[in-house]
Image (cartoon, grey):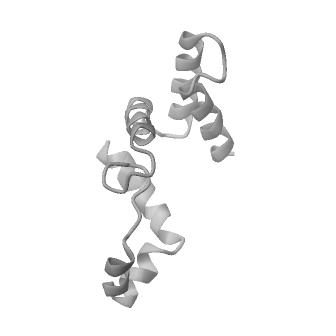
Amino acid sequence: MFWAIFVLGHDCGHGSFSDSPRLNSIVDHILHSSILVPYNGWRISHRTHHQNHVNVENDESWVPLPEMIYNKLDPNTKKFRFTVPFPVIAYPLYLVRD
């Protein structure tokens, strides 16, 4: 359910929900607030993401780990970072940070 709400908010952020920019902004704010995603922080970081899409150095939303660094990680770090519990922990940290 949260993903569906986020997708609607994302569409509002791109202006594809309504022809009215004001309505898009209001609905986007309500939807993001309902899933505890800070609207203005998301709006700014999402704009930066699109301006730097697939740029490994500047994209804030997609930051891949280079294979050379991944191969040097100890097994516990690999397990913690790349399994289900990490997003469960990372999301609340994201909320606290913004």
52 shown above or below 54: above
Tell me how many marks there are: 0
User: Going by the picture, which residue comes out furthest to the bottom?
Assistant: 75
Image coordinates for residue 67, horizontal then vertical, percent: 39, 78
Q: Nearer the viewer, residue 17 or 83?
A: 17
Image coordinates for residue 48, horizontal then vertical, percent: 38, 38
Q: Nearer the viewer, residue 4 or 95?
A: 4
Res 35 → quadrant:
top right
65 shown above or below 7: below
User: Going by the picture, which residue comes out furthest to the front?
Assistant: 55
Residue at x 30%, y 47% (from the top left corner)? 97
Screen quadrant of the C terminus: top left
- Left or right, 58 with reference to 42: left
- Left or right, 5 with reference to 22: right
Residue at x 54%, y 71% (from the top left corner)? 84
Image coordinates for residue 41, horizontal then vertical, percent: 37, 35
Res 80 → quadrant:
bottom left
Residue at x 49%, y 40% (from the top left corner)? 36
Screen quadrant of the N terminus: top right
Residue at x 68%, y 42% (from the top left corner)? 4
7 shown above or below 82: above
